[in-house]
Amino acid sequence: MKQEFNKLQSPMKIGRLSIPNRVVMTAMGTNIAAAGGGVNDDVIAYYEARARGGVGLIITEVTRVADGAGGGEPCQLAARRPSDISELQKLANAIHKYDSKLFVQLQHPGREASPFVTGEQPVAPSAIANPMGGRRHAARSFDRGMRGAGAEVRYRCNVCLS
Ligand SMILES: Cc1cc2nc3c(=O)[nH]c(=O)nc-3n(C[C@H](O)[C@H](O)[C@H](O)COP(=O)(O)O)c2cc1C
């Protein structure tokens, strides 16, 4: 690689995490995970190919932290409960073979959730309708759901990145 790109190839640190280079893949929804949010062969193949190609840090697609109105896509990755960690760990192990690191993008779609995907009314912190779709939603149930999900989020991330 040309000398002008040396910096791109140099390692960096985010907190205590060492990233082998400065090539970062931003989050992109794939909709290829198992229906329950599990990491299947397609997911492994997709992310492993990027790691093999030299991406130092991979950010997963939107990963749901709740079921029901918390769904963003029908076949997205999930980080709802500790049992999901073993699935995400399989993915982390696959890309660690190339020294790449994995960030899991946790997501609750809030008022942007589609009832066509979730089969439920969207929930969000306020009752303001989504300007894109004009959808109404319930304010309080979101608050309850996110408190539950939030309590486990830090635990899940720490495990997945180790
Ligand atoms: C198919 C597709 C799916 C995407 N999914 C996500 C996503 O899950 N989470 C997210 O934060 N951004 C998502 N994005 C946005 C990208 O990560 C990125 O920010 C965007 O494409 C702009 O990048 P650019 O400025 O390099 O073109 C998606 C983009 C595309 C094209």
Image (spheres, helix red, strand yellow):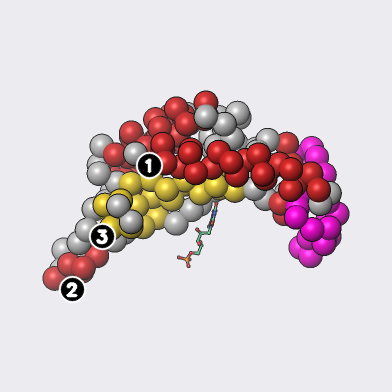
Where in the figure is residue 151, as x and y percent of width and height?
58, 41
Per the model, the C-alpha gap separating discs 1 and 2 is 31 Å
Q: In the image shown, does 50 or 21 lie closer to the viewer?
A: 21
- The image quadrant where one finds the N terminus is bottom left
- Closer to the chain start, of discs 1 and 3, is 3
Does residue 114 appear in this view? no
- Observer-nearest residue: 101 or 115? 101
Observer-nearest of 148 and 132: 148
Is residue 149 placed above or below 37 in the rendered structure?
below
Instruction: Characterize the magenta stretch by its predominant secondary structure.
Output: loop
Between circles 1 and 2, the one closer to the viewer is 1
Q: Earlier in the sequence, mark 1 or mark 2?
A: 2
- Position above or below: 113 against 21: above
Kind of residue indicated by mark 2: Glu
Q: Which residue is pictured at 48% across the width and 39% down the height?
A: 155
In this orientation, does residue 113 appear? yes
The quarter of the displayed image where residue 77 is located = top right
Instruction: Report x, y in % for residue 134.
Output: 83, 60
Whether pointer 1 and pointer 3 mark residues with C-beta atoms closer than 8 Å, the reply is: no
Q: In the rendered structure, which amino acid carries the disc numbered 1?
A: Leu
Graded by Cα atoms within 10 Å as few (under 14), some (14 to 19) or many (20 or more), the crowding at tag 1 reads some
Q: Does 26 appear above or below 61?
A: below
Q: Quadrant of the C terminus?
A: top left
Q: Give the labeled residue for mark 3.
A: 12
Disc number placed over residue 4 in the picture, else none: 2
The residue labelled by disc 1 is 161
Q: Position of residue 36 (x, y in %)?
A: 60, 28
Which is more N-terminal, label 2 or label 3? 2
| Side of 79 where 161 appears, left or right | left
Magenta highlight on residue 24: no
The residue shown at (55%, 38%) is 152
The span shown in magenta is 116-137
